Image: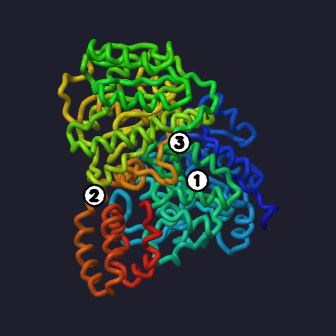
């Protein structure tokens, strides 16, 4: 047993953008010595330059259509290699690309498991449940999870095992693969007398809130030294930044592989939860950092009194920038010119353009964008007033935008200079919003316009705003950007005919949607974003105040989310029983359990799996640590 065993690995790869991510190269590099042969199966149409990235990391490569997901890929690979050759191996390992790793050395795991009296094994198992099967809501049998499966030679030569693979169908729905293959293979092999084990036995965790520990409880996976960590666990775990930080500080694994993958493959709403994208800035005016960047500022002037306020702050900086101004009247242009003459260096004002009063600050900015595209960094500002709200609210909002976006120009431009991957930097949600508004989902009208804009830009990345609860956006539409990061938007050449006449409603116009789509355009064009927060702050209001988990669930599995919605009525009935039991508990626990009902049970439809359990188990699990556990959910 151990070092002398002859092992073969069947590794399944899929990437919707036809790439081979860096985390896969790292994974294969660190496990290739374990196997005599590696069969790399890709369900993507990867290009030649991507093949070069994995040169030397496989013995056989199979390129196929993405049909049947990983089980379809394994089936085809078995048939291509042939059962005669496979029967010569002591161990067949099936693995897919749904995990980061190895966080810990994988070879000792093989040595441990191969000394056990078992025929097949995996890293983790899914607990048995009486309900919750994705797509049907029915029971889920206890099974070894298929992201990593090992079979010995006796199973390889079994006619039942071979018949299982002969009968695998190429389902187009991943839920059918889970229902018919992943959850059933363990039971089929047990029924004919084979024995199994897992490296991390999860059945002992009866009090846990979800039976799929590999997906929902990454901290337990890490603490029990499981070498592979499910990518989805960062999506489903309540506070993924904790996991990212823990790996960075405690495990010898390059956390940049995780960050880069999420930045590339997942939309900003999700990557923003995986690691901290905040820049903490001082409200003190900074000295010139001596940058060689070409910097421009665009200011759209509608209210002249607010314009004077901006000029005051512009003049407090030692950083040189070119100024471009748009306004809507000749009289305003003349006032601006005379004012600029007094306070700005000669030649610093590059252009004043009169535009029609349409599209608020957005259309004037797009109109002048070609002049701005020659600069390294551009700041976009306008003389904002909030006419739909109380005057005090508008004043506070405007001042926060100035303090976060205008005063720390040196900090912001220096950050751009040091981080070439950053395409746009926006201010955090104004603090005053916490006292004025309830956060509500995006309107259907906005979602429709956003989807149309995305389609018109012919963006290469797939996204549907129809399922978005909230947007990461510059509230008030003031921000800094690298022109290269927004070229997809500029290439549309939007003009006056694309914008409705004034007066505009306070929502559901193309101007409002361009404000919402900027972060996503930069993501599509290969750039990341940052959020400016006040000095000493560490977490953005985009995480504190937005319920992003529901939209994450729809991103990962919209059909499962639909099923959860159908089960909501059952959940509410269970909650009534739950509340009756809660009333019998000591008063010091009441507020905590109530918050569980609102912040966990409502948002996680499949909490229906645990609510019927004994109330004492719920208290034991959440207990006095609940406040910490639920922080930033």
Q: Which element carries disc 3, helix, strand or loop?
A: helix
Mark 2 surroundings within 10 Å by alpha-carbon count, few (fewer than 14), some (14 through 19), many (20 or more): some
Q: Residue 352: where, in percent of width, then height?
A: 38, 14
Q: In the image, is 432 to the left or to the right of 518?
A: left
Dividing the picture into quarters, in which one does residue 602 lie?
bottom left
Say which label, 1 or 3, has the lower sequence index: 1
Is residue 523 or residue 34 the one in the foreground? 523
Q: Residue at x 31, y 59 (%)?
A: 564
Say which label, 1 or 2, has the lower sequence index: 1
> Image quadrant for the N terminus?
bottom right
Q: Residue 573: where, in percent of width, then height?
A: 22, 72
Q: Is residue 440 above or below residue 211?
A: above
> Marks 2/3: CA distance?
29 Å
> Marks 1/2: CA distance?
28 Å
Mark 3 surroundings within 10 Å by alpha-carbon count, few (fewer than 14), some (14 through 19), many (20 or more): many
Q: Pointer 1 and pointer 3: residues touching (CB < 8 Å)?
A: no
Q: Residue at x 45, y 16 (%)?
A: 349
Label drawn at residue 263: 3
Label drawn at residue 565: 2
Q: Which element carries disc 1, helix, strand or loop?
A: strand
Label drawn at residue 584: none
Q: Residue at x 67, y 45 (%)?
A: 39
Say which residue label 1 marks. 99
Q: Residue furthest front?
A: 342
Q: Residue 78: where, in percent of width, then height?
A: 61, 48
- Viewer can see residue 188: no
Say which label, 2 or 3, has the lower sequence index: 3
Q: Residue furthest right?
A: 4
């Amino acid at each position: 047993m151990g070092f002398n065993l002859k092992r073969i690995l069947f590794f399944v790869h899929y990437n919707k953008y036809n790439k081979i991510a860096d985390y896969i190269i790292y994974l294969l590099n660190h496990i290739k010595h374990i196997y005599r042969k590696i069969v790399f199966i890709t369900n993507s149409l990867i290009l030649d330059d991507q093949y070069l990235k994995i040169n030397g990391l496989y013995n056989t490569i199979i390129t196929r259509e993405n049909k049947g997901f990983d089980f379809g890929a394994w089936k085809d690979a078995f048939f291509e290699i042939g059962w005669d050759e496979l029967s010569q191996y002591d161990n067949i390992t099936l693995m897919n690309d749904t995990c980061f790793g190895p966080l810990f050395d994988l070879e000792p795991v093989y040595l441990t498991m191969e000394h056990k009296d078992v025929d097949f094994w995996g890293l983790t198992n899914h607990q048995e449940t009486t309900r919750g099967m994705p797509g049907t809501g029915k029971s889920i049998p206890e099974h070894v999870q298929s992201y990593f499966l090992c079979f010995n030679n006796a199973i390889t030569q079994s006619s039942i095992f071979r018949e299982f693979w002969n009968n695998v169908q190429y389902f187009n729905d991943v839920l059918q693969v889970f229902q018919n293959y992943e959850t059933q293979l363990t039971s089929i092999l047990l029924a004919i007398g084979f024995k199994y084990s897992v490296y991390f036995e999860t059945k002992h965790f009866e009090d846990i809130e979800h039976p799929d520990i590999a997906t929902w409880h990454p901290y337990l996976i890490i603490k029990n030294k499981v070498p592979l960590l499910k990518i989805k666990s960062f999506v489903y775990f309540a506070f993924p930044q904790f996991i990212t930080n823990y790996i960075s500080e405690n495990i010898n694994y390059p956390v940049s592989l995780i960050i880069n993958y999420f930045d590339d493959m997942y939309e900003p709403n999700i990557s923003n939860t995986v690691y901290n994208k905040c820049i903490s800035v001082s409200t003190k005016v900074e000295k010139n950092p001596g940058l060689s960047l070409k910097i421009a500022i665009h200011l759209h002037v509608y209210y002249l009194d607010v314009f004077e306020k901006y000029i005051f702050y512009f003049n407090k900086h030692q950083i040189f920038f070119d100024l471009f101004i748009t306004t809507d009247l000749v009289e305003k242009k003349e006032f601006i010119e005379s004012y600029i003459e007094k306070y700005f260096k000669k030649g610093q004002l590059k252009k004043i353009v009169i535009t029609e009063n349409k599209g608020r600050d957005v259309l004037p900015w797009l109109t002048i964008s070609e002049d701005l595209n020659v600069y390294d960094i551009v700041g976009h500002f306008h003389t904002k007033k909030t006419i739909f709200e109380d005057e005090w609210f508008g004043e506070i909002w405007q001042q926060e935008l100035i303090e976060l976006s205008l005063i720390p120009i040196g900090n912001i431009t220096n950050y751009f200079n040091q981080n070439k991957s950053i395409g746009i930097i926006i201010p955090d949600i104004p603090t005053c919003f916490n006292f004025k508004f309830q956060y509500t989902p995006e309107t259907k009208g906005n979602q429709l316009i956003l989807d149309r804009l995305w389609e018109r830009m012919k963006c290469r990345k797939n996204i549907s705003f129809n399922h978005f609860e909230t947007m990461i956006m510059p509230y008030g539409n003031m921000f800094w950007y690298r022109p290269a990061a927004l070229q997809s938007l500029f290439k549309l050449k939007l003009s006056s005919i694309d914008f409705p006449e004034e007066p505009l409603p306070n929502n559901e116009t193309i101007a409002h949607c361009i404000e919402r789509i900027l972060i996503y355009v930069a993501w599509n064009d290969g750039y990341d974003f940052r959020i400016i927060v006040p000095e000493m702050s560490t977490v953005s209001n985009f995480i504190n105040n937005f319920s992003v988990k529901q939209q994450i669930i729809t991103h990962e599995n919209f059909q499962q989310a639909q099923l959860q919605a159908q089960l909501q009525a059952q959940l509410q009935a269970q909650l009534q029983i739950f509340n009756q039991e809660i009333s019998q508990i000591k008063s010091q626990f009441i507020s905590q359990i109530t918050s569980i009902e609102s912040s966990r049970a409502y948002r996680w439809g499949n909490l229906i799996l645990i609510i019927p359990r004994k109330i004492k188990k719920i208290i034991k699990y959440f207990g006095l640590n609940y406040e910490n556990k639920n922080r930033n959910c």
